[in-house]
Amino acid sequence: QVQLEESGGGLVKPGGSLRLSCAASGFTFSDYYMSWIRQAPGKGLEWISYISSSGSTILYADSVKGRFTVSRDNAKSSLFLQMNSLSAEDTAVYYCARADGYSSAHFDFWGQGTLVTVSS
Amino acid sequence: HSALPQPASVSGSPGQSIAISCTGTSSDVGGYSYVSWYQQHPGRAPKLLIYDVTHRPSGVSSRFSGSKSGNTASLTISGLQAEDEAYYYCSSYTSSSTLVFGGGTKLTVL
């Protein structure tokens, strides 16, 4: 069965960096676009990035552009999110999700999320 | 693209039907047939309910249905059940090739 498992979250100081990972299993990872979506405590969902199946196309939300970098290793069925220049506004649960459909515009499988807390 | 407006809360009694709206623009909801809906119980990951405006993934109850008129998409839940109490989010593809979520709606089953 499809499984996505995020890791790498934790407490980081403002201005710091963190790298999240998402291990995928149960499907052919290299066939799918993947996304990162976050949810601040008590708030709604925010799409932040997606990466095409080959990694050749990457898009970011304006809120993270220039600070976050998404990448993937298809040989290891893994997705990554490098987060730099973190601020309190980046505190959230970060989910990786598999994008499906012709437009890759919906997410049919989600991980359980990893919490990132930015605080001094 | 700012978060798509959704009502903050809706409520209904068991067995009733409710609808949740998601209002966008011609640059997102109105311009594409790529609207999705997700259900999220507290402390859990979101679950896909509807994709491409009206399609249900296998395993999702037929009590959940989606529609769109102009720039507004809607999720209808019929025959409300206690386990439907959750948060519901819409999302849409946008003209920037990005995705945007709605602000979320809390459904209370009375």
Image: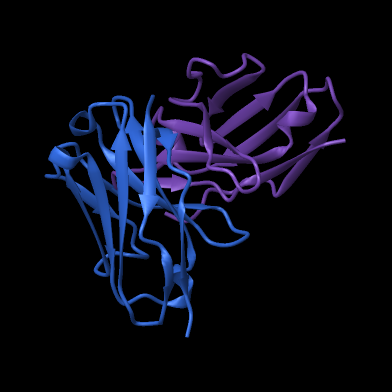
Pinpoint residue B7: horizontal percent, then vertical percent: 68, 46
Left or right: B46 in relation to A11: right
Left or right: A99 in relation to A90: left
Pinpoint residue B74: horizontal percent, then vertical percent: 60, 30
Q: Is residue B73 above or below residue A95?
A: above
- Tell me where residue A64 sits by quadrant: bottom left
Image quadrant occupied by the N terminus of chain B: bottom left
Q: Is residue B110 above or below residue A57?
A: above
- Tell me where residue B12 sits by quadrant: top right
Tell me the shade of chain B: purple
Pinpoint residue B76: horizontal percent, then vertical percent: 66, 25
Q: Is residue B81 above or below residue A66?
A: above
Tell me the shade of chain A: blue
Q: Which residue: 33% across, 29% down?
A: A100
Q: Which residue: 45% across, 35% down?
A: B30
In this view of the protein, which residue sits in the foreground, A6 or B84? A6
Q: Which residue: 42% across, 33% down?
A: A109
State the residue lying farthest toward the bottom: A120
